Image (tube, grey):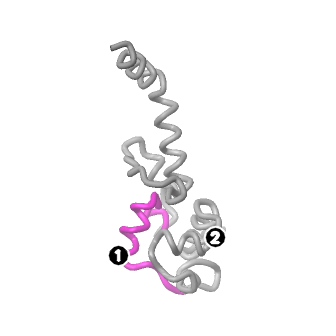
Amino acid sequence: MLDTPQKRLEHYIKTQYGTKVAFAKAIGILPTSVTKYAGTKAKSIFGHEYQVKLNSLGLNIAWYLTGQGEMLESEKESEVVKLTRLDEMTISQMRSVLNWIDANYETMKSIVSSLDDK
């Protein structure tokens, strides 16, 4: 049961990064520090600065703190993903890009086709 911020963070890390090491790299902390914030024995929650970073990675901070709402902010249609190298993107960012491509594929194909004809 995901009844604490620490358990919810651990769930987020497992589903979006696979490992605490990958998560630590994404958020910019040492892998050993993750154990203070994630898991059943963790006692701390991230402060505001890291909550902003977590949110930029797609985590819904309200869900992290209270369990209310959806885990991922990326489930909102308005999310914009800054494209970088694929190995630097989270799974939720990749899903957002794929969903956008699926929704806009025919329009993109038509634009490219019309440009090729010129």
Q: Quadrant of residue 47?
A: bottom left
The tag on residue 24 is none
Q: Looking at numbered disc 2 in the image, what kind of residue is underneath it?
A: Thr
Q: Image point 39% across, 68% down: which residue? A: 53
Q: How many marks?
A: 2
Q: CA distance from mark 2 to mark 1?
A: 23 Å
Q: Residues within 10 Å of mark 2 (few under 14, many from 20)?
A: few
Q: Label 2: which residue? A: 19
Residue 83, x across and y down, in percent: 42, 50
Dot 2 or dot 1, earlier in sequence: 2
Q: Image point 60% across, 71% down: which residue? A: 10
Q: Looking at numbered disc 1 in the image, what kind of residue is underneath it?
A: His
Q: Is residue 105 left or right of residue 111?
A: right
Tell me the magenta residue range.
43-64
Q: Residues within 10 Å of mark 1 (few under 14, many from 20)?
A: few
Q: Label 1: which residue? A: 48
The residue most toward the top is: 117
